[in-house]
Amino acid sequence: MKLFIGILLLVLTLFTAQAKEEKTSTNSSSDLKTTYFSSYHLYSNKNDSALIDSIIFTAITVVFISLIMLIIFLRVEKIKKLKSKNRLKIIQEPFYMEKIHKKFMLSKPQQGDIVERLELFFKILHIKAAKNNNVVVFNYDPKQHRYFSADFKIISYAVHMLNQFVINIISNSSIILTIKNTNITNRIYKVTLKANANILEMDDNIKDALKGKTKNINYKKLVIASNIAKLLGSKLRYQSKSSEFEFSFNLLLTPLQQDNKHKFINEYKNEINALIAEDDINSFHTLTAGLRHYDIKIKPNYTWEIVKKHITDTIFRPELVFIQAKIIKKLSKNDINILKEHKERKNITFIILSNNASYDDVNKVLDFETFTLKQPYTQDALLAVLNRSQQVVMGGGMANFLGYKTEKI
């Protein structure tokens, strides 16, 4: 555009200069005509006619050149736009689509514990879940086999991507990650991610993403999980209702003879009773199954008021009390004092269930020592807390409890 305007101004300048030159020539001729009017009258008429012809010719030339330059300008601009568009396509679209349709390759199967491999991502999920105040519950039957030969790297990544997608699209919800053996003979394990939320309005977009038709970057993690499921010889399935939805895919795992067996250190040498104050029914059932695996008795009621009555009961003596962090945040100062009093009187171990990173500092509300289980947690983490709590009961102290170690059979 600037080039076209510059050339047009140049032409107009030349035209103006020529017009001035013609005018000067005309004025000069006019003076001569005044002096020699009678002698050069015929010559003057011819000169005026030549001036008019020159002006017309110059005007036509300017218009013609302007049209030529306009055509050239339009063609140049069109080429520039095409180049710009192609350049944008080269820079953005493939890079943009590469993020969504990232390709993966299977690696050589490794031997290992699937629970331990998945647990590597749990800390990230615990932090990410805080954004929309969600909680991820890991449900893996303690009696179920754990050692396999499999591509754990890509399996863990698929599960992690699927979890991250779900915790980003819902809020204030409980998300249950379950891995369950569906066919012992065929070694098929089903990975399920279920949540109690309504996402029917997203149905079409989710189905497009699973078919590989979406270009929406918000569905990147879902597309990645779907592509990996296909690579593993399965398919990521999706179904939804008004109050819940579910994603699932199958894994073909080769079990190994080796298994990870742990034992619970029961220093009491007698029956252990536990109370669970938890407003999430899925979390309650998962924790109950984990505790019963070690023959720990659990009261069936999980509301705070019922649990509080059991704590203050003069006859009943619970050794362990699990309390959801969300419940602790709502406790009055009087309730906190009651917990402290009965902890000292009955030698109770309190274990906080932290839903997500937003609740990690809830123990500051309490002025006595507690253990914390950060969700999602594994059976190993639960066992470590149980064993450590028993050591504390026997006088081992709680200082420097940074991780968990287990006694192996």
Image: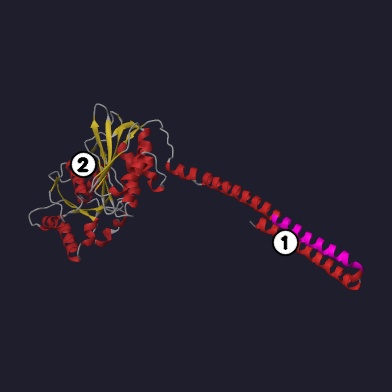
Q: Position of residue 59 (x, y in %)?
A: 73, 59
Q: Residue furthest bottom?
A: 35
Q: Decide whether residue 362 is among the magenta residues.
A: no
Q: Position of residue 35 (x, y in %)?
A: 91, 73
Instruction: Count residues near mark 1 (Cα–Cα under 10 Å), then give few for <14, some for 14-19, many for 20+.
Output: some
| Residue 29 left/right relative to 393 | right
Tell which of 102 and 334 is nearer to you: 102
* Relative to 369, residue 258 above or below: above
Q: Position of residue 360 (x, y in %)?
A: 30, 56
Q: Which mark is residue 264?
A: 2
Q: Which residue is mark 1?
A: 12
* Relative to 332, residue 350 above or below: above
Q: Main secondary structure of the magenta part?
A: helix
Disc 1 and disc 2: Cα gap in Å? Answer: 97 Å
Q: Position of residue 389 (x, y in %)?
A: 22, 49
Say if mark 1 contacts mark 2, CB within 8 Å: no
Give the magenta range.
39-63
Q: Which mark is residue 360?
A: none
Q: How is the image coloured?
A: secondary structure
Q: Residue furthest left?
A: 315
Q: Looking at the picture, which amino acid does disc 2 mark?
A: Phe
| Residue 216 left/right relative to 65 | left
Q: Looking at the picture, which amino acid does disc 1 mark?
A: Leu
User: For numbered disc 2, what is the local secondary structure?
Assistant: loop
Nearer the camera: disc 1 or disc 2: 1
Q: Is residue 259 visible?
A: no
Instruction: Count residues near mark 2 (Cα–Cα under 10 Å), then give few for <14, some for 14-19, many for 20+.
Output: some
The residue depicted at 36 percent of the width and 34 percent of the height is 230
Q: Decide whether residue 57 is among the magenta residues.
A: yes
User: For numbered disc 1, what is the local secondary structure?
Assistant: helix
- Is tag 1's residue or tag 2's residue first in the polypeptide sequence? 1
| Residue 301 left/right relative to 229 | left
